[in-house]
Image (spheres, rainbow, N blue to C red):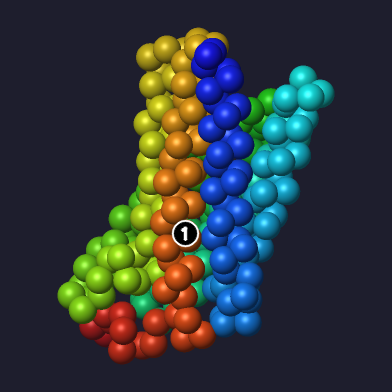
Amino acid sequence: MSWEKINESLNLVAMFSAALPLFYGIHKWSYSIITKLLIFYFAFGLILDGMTFYIYKFLDQNSYWSAPLYYFNYFVILSCVLYFFLKNHIFSKYLTYLMSLGCLFLMSRLLFFNDINTYDNIAYFSIQSYFVLVCLITFYIQAQKPQIRFFNHPLSLISAGIFLNCLLPLISNLLQYNLYETSPIYFQIALIILNISAIIANIFFFLAFKHLTPTSTPKPSQLPREPN
């Protein structure tokens, strides 16, 4: 089996794995704004991924023009999810600034620095680096409360899913563009790594949905506050 066929198969598996947290979480739609955002993220993401797969597989074309939709779904929606989880912590204030700067950066890339029909490696590298940093800070915040257990807290599981889904592709992209340049074989391998990380991330999201409750957003007493 060729690398391309392996990549296509894993792409389909990744889309199927995204359907699991979506269908499991639908009945929790009314729980909180966090559940609504997550359900929208998976539903819209499935539509985008299905459209991209169809255009690539059957029309033999790229769909780089859909980048703004991916930016919105992946950067904006997931940033809002983390924001509402951390709303009672001082870091949420800085997160709003990071989100605003990120949106301005992505808009400038689209309008002034990159052709809409080409892959913008700098933009995706920046998004992945941003989430790796934010998730590391989130892990630190969670670690300040020893009563919070990793596999029983939705924020920890969601952060782990986002972290893995960004860190592994980030490393593979660095290798692709700096060591292997744009080798067609390694390009497929990089996409395989992307799909595998997405599958693992979706498992973490599925586990997070199992622990989401109508009061999933932490109360002020559940998150550490920094001294005034």
Q: Is residue 212 above or below residue 52?
A: below
What secondary structure is marked by label 1? helix
Number of labelled discs? 1
Q: Amino acid at mark 1?
A: Phe
Q: Furthest-left residue in view?
A: 146
Label 1: few (<14), some or many (≥20) within 10 Å? many
Question: Residue visible at 79% across and 24% down?
Answer: 58
Residue that badge 1 annotates = 205
Question: Residue visible at 25% across and 75% down?
Answer: 148
| 161 horizontally vs 80: left or right | left
The answer to which of 1 and 182 lies nearer the viewer is 1
Q: Position of residue 152 (x, y in %)?
A: 32, 71
Q: Quadrant of the C terminus?
A: bottom left
Question: Residue visible at 31% across and 84% down?
Answer: 222
Q: Furthest-front residue in view?
A: 1
Q: Is residue 109 above or below residue 212?
A: above
Q: Position of residue 106 (x, y in %)?
A: 62, 45
| 228 horizontally vs 204: left or right | left
Question: Residue visible at 39% across and 36% down?
Answer: 168
Q: Position of residue 201 (x, y in %)?
A: 44, 50
